[in-house]
Image: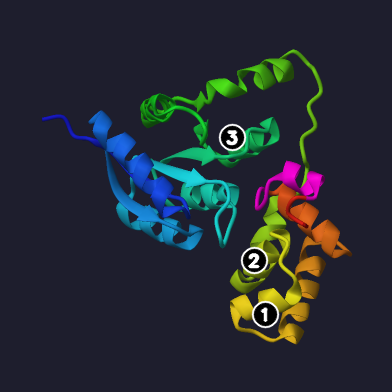
C-alpha cells in the first residue's frame, strides 16, 4: 500500500481548517496529521511531526505566515510550505516565495487547486495559483508592479505580547479595548505601543498600522480604503 503524504494545517479559522482537511483527505493521496491555530503551535507541531507539507495562512494571531515559513524551513528538514491566503496581490506571492514557500493558493480558489498545489510541492516543484497568472505575466513582461520593501524581519524583534498589541491596533481597536482584551492597563498598552513603534521604526499609529498591512497582518487594500481603521 502506497504511503500517504503528510500535511500540517496552520490556520486560525477552525471551520476553514475542517473544510480543507475534508478536501485533502477525500482525495486519498494525503493525510492531515496535525492542525494549529497559531504560528507558535504550528512551529511546534512542524518540528514534532516533520510533515511533507505545511499549509500556512499568511495572517495568524501571533506571527505572519511569511516569518513562520522562514522559521519552519530553518528548523525542519524536508517540509515544503504551501501558503493559503486571502491576499491576491503579487507582492505577497513574491515575499512568500523569497521566504521559501513552494506554493501559493488563494482561499477563494477551487479545492482542485489546493490538491494540485499539494501534489506539485510534495514532489519538490513550485505552484502558483492560476488566478495570479495575469499579474505574473505582467511582471515577467517588465510592467512595473509595486512591491512593498518593508523589512518583515523587524517584526521578529517584537515580543509575543507586542505582536498581539500590533495586530489589535492594526485591526482598528482602540487602546481601551486592547487593554480589556489582553487584561492589561492602559499604561501598559501605551508602553507596548511605544516599544513597537521604536522597534519597527515608525513615529505614528497610522504608520504602525501601515507597517502591519505591508507585512500581511492585515489586508493592505483594506488599510488604504479605511475599512480597518473604521
Rendered location of residue 123, percent (x, y): 36, 27
- Crowding near pointer 2: few (<14 within 10 Å), some, many (20+)? many
Residue bearing mark 2: 163
The answer to whether residue 125 is seen in the rendering is: yes
Q: Secondary structure at mark 1?
A: helix
Mark 1 and mark 3 in contact (Cβ < 8 Å)?
no
The answer to whether residue 79 is seen in the rendering is: no
CA–CA distance between discs 3 and 2?
Answer: 23 Å
Q: Camera-side residue: 79 or 5? A: 5
Rendered location of residue 125, percent (x, y): 44, 25
Residue drawn where x is 65% and y is 53% of the image: 217
Relative side of 138 to 77, left or right: right
Mark sitting earlier along the chain (3/1): 3
Rendered location of residue 78, percent (x, y): 38, 41
Mark sitting earlier along the chain (2/1): 2
- Is residue 224 found inside the magenta-colored segment of the image? yes
Q: How many marks?
A: 3
Q: Secondary structure at mark 2?
A: helix
Location of residue 100 (image quadrant): top right
Q: Which residues are magenta?
A: 216-226
Amino acid at each position: 500500500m502506497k504511503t500517504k503524504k503528510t500535511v500540517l494545517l496552520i490556520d486560525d479559522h477552525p471551520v476553514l481548517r475542517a473544510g480543507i482537511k475534508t478536501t485533502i483527505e477525500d482525495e486519498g493521496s494525503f493525510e492531515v496529521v496535525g492542525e494549529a491555530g497559531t504560528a507558535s503551535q504550528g512551529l511546534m507541531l512542524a518540528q514534532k511531526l516533520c510533515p511533507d507539507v505545511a499549509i500556512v495562512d499568511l495572517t495568524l494571531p501571533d506571527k505572519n505566515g511569511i516569518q513562520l515559513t522562514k522559521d519552519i524551513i530553518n528548523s525542519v528538514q524536508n517540509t515544503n510550505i504551501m501558503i493559503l491566503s486571502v491576499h491576491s496581490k503579487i507582492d505577497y506571492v513574491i515575499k512568500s516565495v523569497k521566504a521559501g514557500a513552494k506554493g501559493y493558493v488563494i482561499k477563494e480558489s477551487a479545492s482542485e487547486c489546493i490538491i494540485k498545489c499539494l501534489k506539485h510541492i510534495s514532489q519538490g516543484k513550485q505552484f502558483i495559483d492560476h488566478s495570479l497568472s495575469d499579474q505574473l505575466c505582467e511582471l515577467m513582461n517588465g510592467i512595473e508592479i509595486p512591491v512593498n520593501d518593508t523589512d518583515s524581519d523587524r517584526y521578529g524583534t517584537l515580543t509575543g505580547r507586542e505582536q498581539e498589541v500590533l495586530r489589535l491596533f492594526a485591526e482598528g481597536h482602540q487602546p481601551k479595548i486592547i487593554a480589556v482584551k489582553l487584561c492589561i492597563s492602559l499604561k501598559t498598552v501605551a508602553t507596548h505601543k511605544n516599544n513597537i513603534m521604536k522597534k519597527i521604526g515608525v513615529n505614528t499609529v497610522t504608520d504602525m498600522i501601515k507597517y502591519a498591512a505591508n507585512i500581511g497582518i492585515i489586508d493592505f487594500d483594506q488599510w488604504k480604503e479605511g475599512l480597518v481603521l473604521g
